[in-house]
Amino acid sequence: MPGGTVTLSTGNWQTEAALRMLRNNLDPAVAERPEDLVVYGGTGKAARDWPSYHAIERCLTTLAEDETLLVQSGKPVGVLRTHEWAPRVLIANSNLVGDWATWPEFRRLEALGLTMYGQMTAGSWIYIGTQGILQGTYETFAAVAEKRFGGTLAGTLTVTAGLGGMGGAQPLAVTMNDGVALVIECDPRRARRRLETRYLDELASDVDDAVARVRAAKSERRALSVGVIGNAAEVLPELLRRGLEVDIVTDQTSAHDPLAYLPIGVDVDDWHDYAAKKPDEFTDRSRDAMAAHVDAMLGFLDAGAEVFDYGNSLRSEAKLGGCERAFDFPGFVPAYIRPLFCEGKGPFRWAALSGDPADIAATDRAILELFPENESLARWIRLAGERVEFQGLPARICWLGYGERHLAGLRFNEMVASGELKAPVVIGRDHLDAGSVASPYRETEGMADGSDAIADWPLLNALVNTASGASWVSIHHGGGVGMGRSIHAGQVCVADGTPLAATKLERVLTNDPAMGVLRHVDAGYERATQVAAERGVRVPMETQ
Ligand code: NAD
C-alpha cells in the first residue's frame, strides 16, 4: 500500500501523520520533480534541501506530544515545549517583507540557501496529487456550464494549456461535465503522465490531428479530452487564425513564475538551463510570449467565447509583456467561485494513512450518508470513485462549507475509533479557501469593498487554527500567483480516533470555514451575512 501502514515509526499519530504526508508529497507518483524536492506549481517544494528534509524526518520521529517543531521555509529551526492542544508543527514559507517581495530578491535569497518557494500545499505537506484541484476545476466548469451553456458542457469545446500537477485536472474536469477539451502542453513528458493517470483521454500527433479530433467529438456531443504538444503562445494564435469554433478559453501554465513559462523559440530541453543562466532575458521573453498568448485569448473573447484567468497570474504577466487589454477578461473567483466562499465552502480534503483505497471508499460512503440532499456532491463522489486514479496515499477531495466540514471530521474520527477504517485519516485543505488567503489577482480579486490586498485575514486564519487545535499550521507567501501577490494559510488535523481528536476536529473544522464567512460578511456580501445569521456565526458588529 503506497506510503501507509498501521505501524507507527514515530511516537504518536499526530506526528506520524505529518511525517507520512511530507513523504507522500515527495512520492514519485505524487510529486512532479521529487529528486529536486519539487512537488507541483512550478517550483513549489516540500523542504528546502535534502539535509533539511532528513532533519525534519529525524525531528518528527522523536517529537513528543507536548512539543512543536518550527519549520522556516523548508528548514527545521527549532523544537519547543508547548502542550498537547498545540500544533505539532508550525510552518512559515517564502515570507518576505513587502518592499522586498519580488522574484529577483527571492531568488537571490534562495541561491544563498536562506529560503524556498512553498507554493500552497507543497510546503505545508497536504498535496494529494492532481485530484486536489480536480473538484474545484470540475465545479468551475460546472459553473461555466450553468452560466452560459444551459447546465452542461455537452457540445462545447474548451481550449486551455498546461498539463502539470494542477493544470492536468482540466481535461478530466471538462469531460466530467460532458464537454470536449483541447489542452496545449509544451512538455511531452507531462502530457504522457496525464494520459497514464487517465486525466487525459488522447494525445494528438499535431495541431491538424487535434483539431480534427475535437471537431468530430464536439459535433457528436461526445465527451473527449485531447492533448497537443506545442507552445501555447504559438498554438492558441494558430487556432484563432484557423477559425476553430471555441466556446471556452482558459489557461493553467505556470505563468505565476516567468521562469516556469516557456518562451517562444526555446526548446523544452534547454528551458531550465537557460532560465538559470539568464533569468532577466528569459523573463522578458516569457512575458512577450504570455502577451501573445493573452492576445489570442482576447481574440476568442471578442469572438464570443467565455474566457477567464484560471488563477496563475497570466493576465498580470502578459500586461508586463505589453498586452494592454490583459484584464478585459475576469479571474475565475469573482466570475464563478465567490458565492461558494460566502458559505465558507472550499476544497476540503482527506487522505487515508493506512494506504488502503478501501478506507477512502468507506469515507466516500460516509459523505453520501451525511449529506444526502446534496446532489452535486453525490455526483462528484460517484464520478471521483469511478474515474480518479489515486497518486500516493489514497485521498479524496470535496467542497464542503461552514456547518458541514466538522460533521465529516467527527464521522471519520468515529470510523477510526470503531475500526471501520484501518488507520487514522489526515484532514486538511488547499490554501485556496474561503477565509485563508489574500490574493488580489485570484481569491480576493474584485472584493465588494475593495479590500483585495488586505492580508490580515490569512494571518488571523492561521492564528485561529493554532488556537483551535490543528495538528500543523502554515503561513505562506506567493502561492498560486507568485512573489508579492499573495499571503495564505493552511491547516491540517488528524482524526486518530481519540476523544481529544474529536474535540479538536470539531473546533478546527468549525472555526476554519467560519473565517470564510466572516471575511465575506466584512466585505459586504449579503449571502455571507445570511449564512452567518442562519448558521449561528457570531459577527460582533452585525449581530451583537
Ligand atoms: P506545473 O508547473 O506542474 O505545470 C505547468 C505546466 O505548464 C507544465 O507542464 C509546463 O510544461 C506547461 N507550460 C509552461 N509554459 C508553457 C507554454 N508556453 N505552453 C504550453 N505549456 C506550457 O504547475 P501546476 O501545478 O499545474 O500549476 C499551474 C498554474 O496554476 C500555476 O501558476 C499555479 O500557481 C496555478 N494554480 C491555479 C489553481 C487554481 O485553483 N486555479 C490552483 C493551483 C495552482
Image (spheres, grey):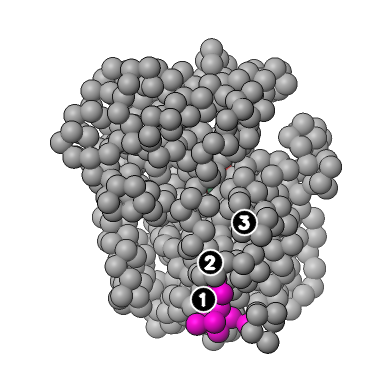
* Amino acid at circle 1: Val
Q: Main secondary structure of the magenta part?
A: helix
Question: How far apart are the alpha carbons under marks 2 and 1?
Answer: 8 Å
Q: Residue 255 colored magenta?
A: no
Give the residue displayed 41% in from the left and 51% down from the top: 140
Residue 174 shows up from this direction: yes
Residue of label 3: 447
Q: Position of residue 54 (x, y in %)?
A: 67, 49
Residue of label 1: 531
* Amino acid at circle 3: Met
Whether ligand 1 has any atom under 8 Å from the Cβ at mark 1 is answered as no
Q: Disc 2 or 3, which lies upstream in sequence?
A: 2
Return the residue nearer the eye: 214 or 4.
Answer: 214
* Quadrant in which the N terminus appears: bottom left
Residue of label 2: 342
Badge count: 3
Depicted 273 relative to depicted 320: above or below? above
Q: Residue 537 colored magenta?
A: yes
Return the residue nearer the eye: 239 or 54.
Answer: 239
Q: Are marks 2 and 1 in contact (CB under 8 Å)?
A: yes
Dot 2, how many residues are within 10 Å of its Cα: few (below 14), some (14-19), or many (20+)? many
* Quadrant in which the C terminus appears: bottom right
Please report the bounds of the magenta region as a residue range. Answer: 528-538
Q: Position of residue 242 (x, y in %)?
A: 33, 17
Q: Position of residue 44 (x, y in %)?
A: 61, 42
- Name the side, left or right, on which 212 lies relative to 307: left
